[in-house]
Image (cartoon, rainbow, N blue to C red):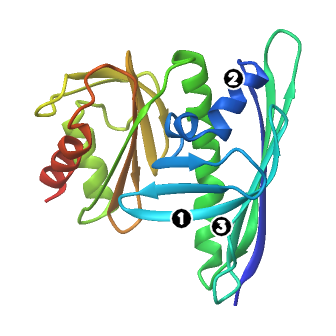
Amino acid sequence: MPQPFEIELETTLAASPEQVWEAIATGPGIDSWFMGANEVEPRVGGIAAMDTGGHREESTVIAYDPGKRLATRTEPDADGKFMAFEYLLEGREGGSTVLRVVHSGMLGDDWQDEYDALRSGWPFHLHTLSEYLTHFPGRIGVPVFGVANGESAQQVRAALTAALALPTPITNGARAHAEIAGLPPLDGEVVWADDQRFEVRTADALYSFHQGPTGLTLMFHHLFGPKTDGAQAAWQQWLNTLLG
């Protein structure tokens, strides 16, 4: 039976409301910190779409007030499930912005697991938004999505740790290094680490790795450098080989 839910978060970003708006209300901006490849029609009634590995999800823009408020909502499915997102921006002295995010809707039969995943994921995504606005302001990221299955969450974490030359356990500030065929070397610093995900920032990219409890592994990367051709295929091949 569908269950209603609501998650509300607030964060202060070291960026102007105009910069934050570009990041949360345009396709290229969302590509630079969130998930998948995105499109936003800039008007009430427009379509906001996200594509992750060929899976496209669409929602309708129900509020569009540049620099202040954006809201979207998906159509309910046959079971009544839907997702709604609202972003509220407020400028502060010194050029910073307070961003409030409200994620609500109806979840399905596994609502508790879905809710827990959403609740734990949002702080990470807002952290990535802050990393983007702080270290790559005005730049547009090329999104890379990858997915593969490992034997277990423990096996995946061990494989990723070894492949990226990271310590056990993975901690903030640890240095990462990897050689991916066809791409420049990865040299960076861990800027987020928890039991389910970690993120590495380099001079020209944000790399994030997410593990599910059954070994399902996702990558959501954002590349800001000049050499991005073939990155999607190269990273997917790397992950397939690592977990195959």
Q: Residue at x 36, y 69 (%)?
A: 214
Whichever of labels 3 and 2 marks the residue nearer the N terminus, that label is: 2
The amino acid type found where label 3 is placed reads: Tyr
Find disc 1 in the rendering and name its residue.
57
The Cα–Cα distance between marks 1 and 2, rounded to whole angstroms, is 25 Å
Find disc 2 in the rendering and name its residue.
19
Closer to the camera: disc 1 or disc 3? 1
Query: Would you call the spot at circle 1 few (<14 residues within 10 Å), some (14-19), or many (20 or more)?
Result: few
Position in image of residue 148 (x %, y %): 26, 60
Which quarter of the figure is the N terminus placed in?
bottom right
Which quarter of the figure is the C terminus placed in?
bottom left
Label 3 secondary element: helix
Label 2 secondary element: helix
Q: Residue at x 18, y 28 (%)?
A: 183
Position in image of residue 85 (x %, y %): 73, 55
The Cα–Cα distance between marks 1 and 3, rounded to whole angstroms, is 19 Å
Query: For this rendering, which residue is in front, 129 or 76?
Result: 76
The amino acid type found where label 2 is placed reads: Gln
Q: Residue at x 56, y 56 (%)?
A: 49
